[in-house]
Image (cartoon, rainbow, N blue to C red):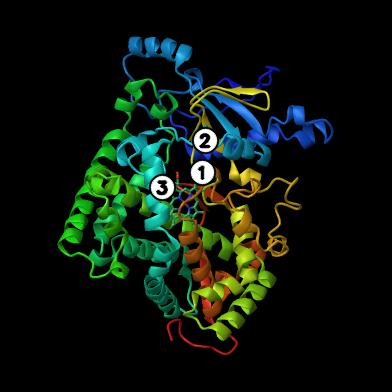
Amino acid sequence: MKGLRDKGDRGIQVDVPDFHGRLHPEDFLDWLSSVEKFFDWKDQWGHAGTTEYALESFFIVEIELLSLNFTMEIEIPSLPILFFSYIFLFMVMRVPTIVISSPEYAKQVMRVHDVNFASRPSILFSKIMLYDGADLAFAPYGEHWRQVRKIFMQELLSTTRVQSFKYIREEEMFNFIDSISSNVGGVINLSERLNMMMYNIISRAACGRTRIHNQEFVPVLKEAIEVSLGFELADLFPSFKLFYHMSPSKPKLERLRERVARIFEEIIHEHKEQKPKERSDEDLVDVLLKFHDNDDLGFSLTSENIYAIIFEIFAAGIETSATSVEWAMSELMKNPKIMKRAQDEVREVFHRKGLENERALDEMKYLNSVIKESMRLHPTLPLLLPRQNKEKCEINGYEIPAKTNTIVNAWVIGRDPTYWPEPEIFKPERFLDDSNFIDSKLGNNFEYLPFGGGRRICVGMSFGLLSVELSLALLLYHFDWMLPNGMKNEDLDMTESFGASLQRKNVLQVIPNNRKDELIGAYVS
Ligand code: HEM
């Protein structure tokens, strides 16, 4: 990698570490933050007249073969072929990539040039695991994406459908709280329990009537996500097909895809055998099957589409939701006064409205602000999902070639001091003053992007937020919390680790205790 150049080519060079053939997101993120520091215009040039130099907001990374070390993790072809490839690639095969790190530029990509930037780059993972964009999240912008998105919005995750899963949330959250109750006074791994609970909710909503075979499916899901984590050479040099065929991840993903297909095939078969008795019994597979090879509805889904979409619901919905609760809980553990205020609110509202009433969440303004603030500091997809522009365009004088990979750095944007005074401080009150913020401006407010923005904004936002709010509210309602080994609140480690989502480096270990105040009752009364 040669470095960064602005359009005027002021000759600014940045040292780029050797990524040893595979560009791991963690290295990439570290590197990005060093670049952010380098271009910290407040330090470098002071406040005045800096827009011209606002390179921290926007820069082009040119990834070139030269600096990638092929000898470490990549199987290399023989030397002459490598030499030939090297010359060839060096000349033509680089992928222009831009990283957007300011609300102004995010607005350019997600609103002003939204349609142009509404595609996704085709990556090895989506090519194989998702049948080359047969899903929604990695589908190129076009008719297929439009139709599948419509199915998600109007059928799969509509308000009515999300409401119809209330009984699933109730039962799974009851089990979750119940299992924590039996460990009162002991240390629990909250991260693991949250993941399991979110998995149960999603799996029942998706395939409910014929329970998915967890023992077989969970390891496949985990492995597929793990394999998808590395930045593949094949993705950096998409026109060079040899990298695609040589990638060690390719056979792994192909095997995983076959295993997933076998599991889903069985589920679909069972669904066809036992049709839902009434509409309220429908799960997401039932809904998708209505479109299966059925041209009467004007749009039809193949089996591959259905496999890719079900897989995506699992991959997109579980970790994002579980991690969001985990971070909010971590911030509360670290800030006991905020915890107390949130707990008082939750207990008062549930006491008045009843635990089974999900609408009670609407009255928990402070809890709501806690979640928004936690998502600002810890967006679970810190770089969202990559976008790609169809046509060449110009943004603020920079010429962006067609098919430029575009990464929006929501993590940095959420900490931009121009928009967020004292950005590193966890302060839910900043959202309390503007209580409609998340509802009215989400996706239109480019300084706050935990769910992305524009036409590719998260389609599972209401479903995800409801699970996050409800589970956090119940954790606060039922228990008082302590850290293990007499650890002080302020000493809780908040180090982040970048995986499929932005997770805690160390799992969240906490001790649930019985409430000191009067216990009001079990979740489902
Ligand atoms: C708190 C939980 C969640 C968070 C933080 C989250 C976050 C995100 C983000 C940042 C994006 C990328 C948006 C962009 O590119 O601008 C996204 C896309 C997406 N999410 Fe979520 N998500 C959550 C829950 C869910 C759930 C529960 C589902 C489904 C059951 C889901 C399904 C999707 C899909 C299908 C896309 C791709 C949309 C498209 O490309 O058109 N998400 N999500």
Q: Identify the residue under disc 1.
A: 455
268 over 83 or under it: above or below: below
Is residue 515 at all visible to an observer of this figure? Answer: no
Give the mark, 1 or 2, whose residue is nearer the N terminus. Answer: 2
Q: Name the residue at 68% across, 38% down.
A: 104
Residue 136 found in image quarter: top left
Quadrant of the rendered image containing residue 298 = top left
Q: CA distance from mark 1 to mark 2?
A: 8 Å
Quick one: SS at disc 2? Answer: loop
Query: Residue 327's x, y, as percent?
Result: 56, 60
Q: Residue flagged by tag 1: what amino acid is it?
A: Arg
Q: Position of residue 121 (x, y in %)?
A: 44, 32
Q: Is residue 187 above or below residue 87?
A: below
Mark 3 or mark 1: which comes first in sequence?
A: 3
User: Which residue in the protein does label 3 denote?
Assistant: 149
Q: Is mark 1 within 8 Å of ligand 1?
A: yes
